[in-house]
Amino acid sequence: MKRAFLLGLLILLLPTLCWGIVYIDIEAPGHKTLPIAVAPFMGNPVLGTKARQILKSDLEYTGFFNVLKEDTFLGEKPSAEVDFKRWQLIGAYLLIKGRVEKSGNRFQLDLRLYDVNKGLELLAKRYTGAENALRYAVHRFMDNLMQVLSGEPSVFQTMIAFVYKTKRGKEIYITDFDGYRPRSLTQFHNICLSPKWSPLGDKLLFTSYKRGNPDVYLLDIKKGIAKRIIHYPGLNIGATWSPDAKRIAVTLSIKGRQGIYLVNNKGRIERCLVRSSGINVSPTWSPDGKKLAFVSDRSGCPQIYILDLTTNKISRLTYEGNYNVSPAWSPKGDYIVYAGIKDGHFQLFMIRSDGSVIKQLTDGDSDCQSPSWSPDARFIVFSRDKRLFVLRLCDGKVFPLLKTLPGEQSQPNWSPWLK
Amino acid sequence: MRKNHLLALFVALVLIFPLACAHKKPALEVPQAVTPKEKAPAKEAAIPEQVVKAPEEGKVAKVEGEQLSEEELAKQKQMAKERSFKQEIRQFEGEDIYFDFDKYNIRPDAASVLEKKAQWLKVHPNVRVLIEGHCDEWGSEEYNLALGERRANSAKEFLVNLGVDPSQISIISYGEEKPAVVPPAYCKDVQKIMHSHGIRPNHEVPSVYLGPNITLCMVDACQKAWAKNRRCHFVVIQY
């Protein structure tokens, strides 16, 4: 019953959450998917099967396509010409054709997207590279496809950073958006927490106890170098870059008072933003960089507040429930997602940044925590009972991120678009 | 019930009494006069005289090199002193203070522990101590880091108010990262039950809420574990 209600809410929300493209009638009620056919690839059969499989699972990841089953296909002579009639007959609106050739350990992949009803080629791309880059060529095509169909790329060239519990501590890990190839970035054999991507996606900020105190480290992913940059006595946690990448908001506890400070990229304090005798933690920037949401216990229990950086005014955002934490501001700016205790469980909620609308996103007997938005704001990654899951906002579907990695995972953070 | 107790007491007394008396009997007995078997000799024989001296004041035996042994003595004394100081440190470090859920105010039970600690720190001004703030596993990691820091800070402020030099104290928060007690695996289920009835970790759980696999004993064990993790731990880092 509750679930049905939740689904109803999400359906009502669809027009705002899902993409406004010409290929989906966003005015129509309910969640509609576009029927798409992926023809068997020509050329090298081994690489062809592999590439096609990746493409199909990428299409399914979005939640916007109905990937037609192969046994309905009428078959087509392998030729450059497309027989649109044959695809129209099985109900396909869109068609993808591919060809992959192999020479040595390199591939050449051609992918074309067609509008079946109009008989139009919408997209044609050729990618070459070493064999292990094949899946990334397909991912790149998918972002091109989403760009053409929705006016914006999706998550296919993004990664997710998270905290992974090992025998000797907690380390920072990253994985592809689809959970492929989780790998460690740190081997501190110590406690590492709260990874946050830089706006360009080339660096990570995180907190570690490597040198005893919880200090903020800056990790250059390409160079593989971590440097301690914010290390004031006391807490140095929750460091988050401003959208222009010039400043960092971070919780420090200077002279016994906990506050959120603005520091530059070298860790020098520019000014104090919020300070009180209580708790002030977990800052998150609005995408225009003019506001900061954070958690404070000034009301007696943790609630989410918004600081207007131009007027320095602080206003309380959440009033429902008595334990609301981990805010994350949507990259579109309209909503803030957070974790709050309701009926005894941590659930994810979405609240408009003016506080006017609250929507519960998760339900059930487990604890959902640490939400983070995808850069296209169509997905939220979060931890549920120490495992990572992805919530697809257009239909409310929740699926596990890391299917094969055992062990405790927490504090996921979705990267920006990586180019 | 009460009557039964009294009866039992009476029976016990009756049983014990003769025993107690039997024990005392020899003391009451009058010693009998010994009758000499033979007549005493008319003249006493001369007894050779013996000179008795009180024993001299004993001296501790000295073994080769008086000087060294005194040094050693001092050393031993020093070591004993150190041992007892280390014992004091162990005692100081061994006692944590505890907090209520999501709170960082000093409870009365913690205050009396802190008073003892303050006394000791004032007597040993060279001692430097690190106060670690910890939390239970309820709540978000980042909020708990902040909460642990507030707890350590409360403890520090309390000690400073009692006259401890603030430079003797540093603080650190470990949030929920280093629990003193890892709660048993079933505490996840206990937490779920408590969550679903909106019961805070330190509040009582009515038995009617419990499922078939959870007993009140288990709830108790979990609550004890969580309570042990909402703490400040004290470490002497220099002396």
Image (cartoon, rainbow, N blue to C red):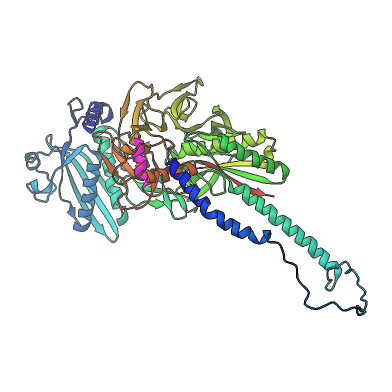
Which image quarter is the C terminus of chain A in? Answer: top left
Q: Quadrant of residue A148?
A: top left
Assign the magenta stretch its main secondary structure: helix
Residue at 34% from the left image edge and 39% from the top image edge: B207
- Front residue (pair A346, A388): A346
**Residue B190 is one of the magenta-drawn residues:** yes
Total labels drawn: 0
Q: Where in the figure is residue B201, as x and y percent of width and height?
A: 42, 37
- Front residue (pair B172, A396): B172
Which image quarter is the N terminus of chain A in? Answer: top left
- Front residue (pair B8, A386): B8
Magenta residues span B186-195
Q: Where in the figure is residue A234, as x and y percent of width and height?
A: 58, 39
Q: Quadrant of residue B197?
A: top left
- Front residue (pair A105, A160): A160
In this rendering, does residue A289 appear at all? no
Q: Where in the figure is residue A389, as x and y percent of width and height?
A: 32, 42
Q: Is residue A82 left or right of residue A17?
A: left
